[in-house]
Image: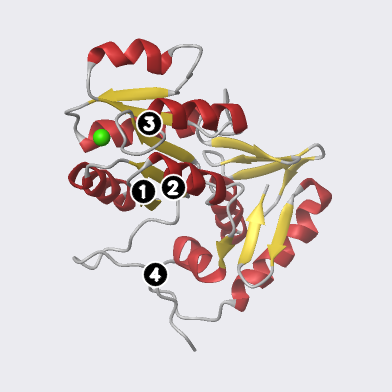
Amino acid sequence: MERPRGPRTPDGAVAPADAGTVVVIEDDAHIADLVALYLRRDGFRVVQVGDGVRGLEHARHQQPRLVIVDVGLPGALDGFEVCRRLRREGTVPVIMLTARDDEVDRVLGLELGADDYVTKPFSPRELTARVHAILRRSAPSDGAPPDVSRVGGVTVDRARREARTADGVVPLATREFDLLAYLAANQGLALSRSQIIEAVWGADWYGDERTVDVHVRQLRKKLGSALPLDTVWGVGYRLG
Ligand code: CA
């Protein structure tokens, strides 16, 4: 039997589950590295890019949950232009890094419409707090209390440890509920079996990854078509 392994921090603590991708477009390597360090610590996959042209490419192709863009970038596209194009093409949240207070009006203005900004020098903690705030705001459970989320026709209530559909409360075993809650907290992300095992069963759990499949089968049986749970071939599962 294989023991599932996840990323580990140097002190041996298990890194948090994959919170999705953030693209960081910043030419100052010192700032970019620091920002990336803090985001990775919070479980994000970070793509660092030093100019606007490549930054826009990565923002288009890596399906990030959020993009952080420095206003002052070398090359053909500055941060303003990157933000303008991202806005025109989609809804990915954007946080701008500004060097001067007088850039702020423009950054938040109608033309650019960034979701938020931080002015240099900033603390990485402040930036990650803003990242989390924006992701909470843009989450599908918007408006609901934080421990209740809705996916398809299923309401996942973490406080009550209940799953509800139009037909009422659906009784789930403990691990089934834990699995559903984890999938719901990571809506839209393809999660590997080993990621799921580590988050739901714990890093010290010895056993087979097929355990995940067995529990998924139970969830599908009990929640039926209310549960928009896809099998991602070669990876694992994705909810919503
Ligand atoms: Ca810069």
Badge 1 marks a residue whose secondary structure is strand
Cα distance, mark 2 to mark 4? 30 Å
Badge 4 local density, few (<14 within 10 Å), some, or many (20+)? Answer: some
The spot of residue 202 in percent (x, y) is 42, 66
The answer to the question of whether label 2 and label 4 lie on touching residues, with beta carbons closer than 8 A, is no
Q: Nearer the viewer, mark 2 or mark 4?
A: 2
Q: Circle 3: is it few (<14), some (14-19), or many (20+) Cα within 10 Å? A: some
Ligand 1 rendered quadrant? top left
Q: Amino acid at mark 1?
A: Val
Q: Amino acid at mark 3?
A: Asp
Place of residue 119 in the rendered image (x, y in percent of width and height, measured from the top left): 24, 23
Residue highlighted by disc 3: 78
Tell me how far mark 1 sits from mark 2, CA to CA: 7 Å
Is the residue under label 3 in contact with that under label 2 (CB below 8 Å)?
no
Q: Which mark is residue 49?
A: 1
Instruction: Say which residue label 4 marks.
Output: 6
Which numbered disc, 2 or 4, marks the residue that appears first in the sequence?
4
Distance from Cα at disc 3 to Cα at disc 1: 13 Å
Q: Amino acid at mark 2?
A: Arg
Residue marked by disc 2: 54
- The answer to whether mark 1 and mark 2 are in CB contact below 8 A is yes
41 left or right, relative to 82? left
Q: Is residue 130 left or right of residue 9?
A: right
Q: Earlier in the sequence, mark 4 or mark 3?
A: 4
Nearest the camera: 85 or 124? 85
Q: Quadrant of residue 82?
A: top left
